[in-house]
Image (cartoon, rainbow, N blue to C red):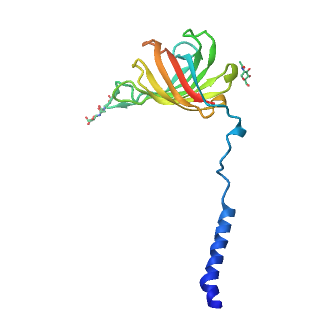
């Protein structure tokens, strides 16, 4: 009887005890959530069009260089490689800067290409009008600024744009070589609820 206990029942007891304590010790950091109580409606595709203003000139710039291009062998890269700007740019309904303000593009971009002028952009579109007031979209992508149309991914969003995914197409409306000021047309295609 003692032998049976040692060989069969004791190991079984150990296993049962261990599995119970393992269950109890499991932290509740991951749970599946039902979609309906979150009151999500059906997913839809929205298209927005607006103008993005990068202003370096004048007394109220919305874009500032925060890292200057480093010099290698006493020369700077012809593509500005290594330079970074921080932005808090206006998003307006029309190309005119004083047209209706829809929100702001906040973030930064850096010259990330050694072959051509190519930006890495990381920015949030922060909307401040109508039902989208307070909602954001996050854009992160590659922007070769001298191409006619540049496409960048929308990688997420908040507020009315929770679960957002999509893309933007940027095309230059005006660009002032001397000051660096630019007005860019953005077409945003985004899936959200
Ligand atoms: C810098 O100079 C060194 C030595 O002349 C050369 O080997 C190197 O390729 C140069 N680097 C660049 C980025 O021009
Ligand atoms: C860079 O310029 C400095 C000052 O003119 C000089 O002393 C140095 O040798 C230069 N370095 C190279 C790699 O040309
Ligand atoms: C947007 O929301 C902010 C903060 O809730 C509020 O102060 C502001 O008046 C709102 N703007 C519009 C246009 O609804």
The image shows residue 66, relative to residue 54, as above or below, that is below
Side of 117 relative to 168 (left or right): left
Side of 18 relative to 151 (left or right): right
Q: Foreground residue, 98 or 189?
A: 189
Percent x, y of residue 188 = 54, 22
Looking at the rendered image, the quarter that the C terminus falls into is top right
Q: Quadrant of residue 119?
A: top left
Percent x, y of residue 120 = 45, 30
Q: What's the residue at 43%, 19% (across, down)? A: 149
Query: Dividing the image into four equal quarters, which quarter contains ligand 2?
Result: top left
Q: What's the residue at 48%, 20% (across, down)? A: 170
Percent x, y of residue 9 = 64, 81
Q: What's the residue at 54%, 12% (across, down)? A: 58
Q: Quadrant of residue 91?
A: top right
Q: In which quarter of the image is residue 49?
A: top right
Side of 82 relative to 186 (left or right): left
The image shows residue 57, relative to residue 17, as above or below, that is above
Looking at the rendered image, the quarter that the N terminus falls into is bottom right
Q: What's the residue at 56%, 16% (across, down)? A: 50
Q: Can residue 61 be seen in this view?
A: no
Q: Foreground residue, 166 or 53?
A: 166
Q: Can residue 45 be seen in this view?
A: yes
Number of numbered labels in the structure image: 0
């Amino acid at each position: 009887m003692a032998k049976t206990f040692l060989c069969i029942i004791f190991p079984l007891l150990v296993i049962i005890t261990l599995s119970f304590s393992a269950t109890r010790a499991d932290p509740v950091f991951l749970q599946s959530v039902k979609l309906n109580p979150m009151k999500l409606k059906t997913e839809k595709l929205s298209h927005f069009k607006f103008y993005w203003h990068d202003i370096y000139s004048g007394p109220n710039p919305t874009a500032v260089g925060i890292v200057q291009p480093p010099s290698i062998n006493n020369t700077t890269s012809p593509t500005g490689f290594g330079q970074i700007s921080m932005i808090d740019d206006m998003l307006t309904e029309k190309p005119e800067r004083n047209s209706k303000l829809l929100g702001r593009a906040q973030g930064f971009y850096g010259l990330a290409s050694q072959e051509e002028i190519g930006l890495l952009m990381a920015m949030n579109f922060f909307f401040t009008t109508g039902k989208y007031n307070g909602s954001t979209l996050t854009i992160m992508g590659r922007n070769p600024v001298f191409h006619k149309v540049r496409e960048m991914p929308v990688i997420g969003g908040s507020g009315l744009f929770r679960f957002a995914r999509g893309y933007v197409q940027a095309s230059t409306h005006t660009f002032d070589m001397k000051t660096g000021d630019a007005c860019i047309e953005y077409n945003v295609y985004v899936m959200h609820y």
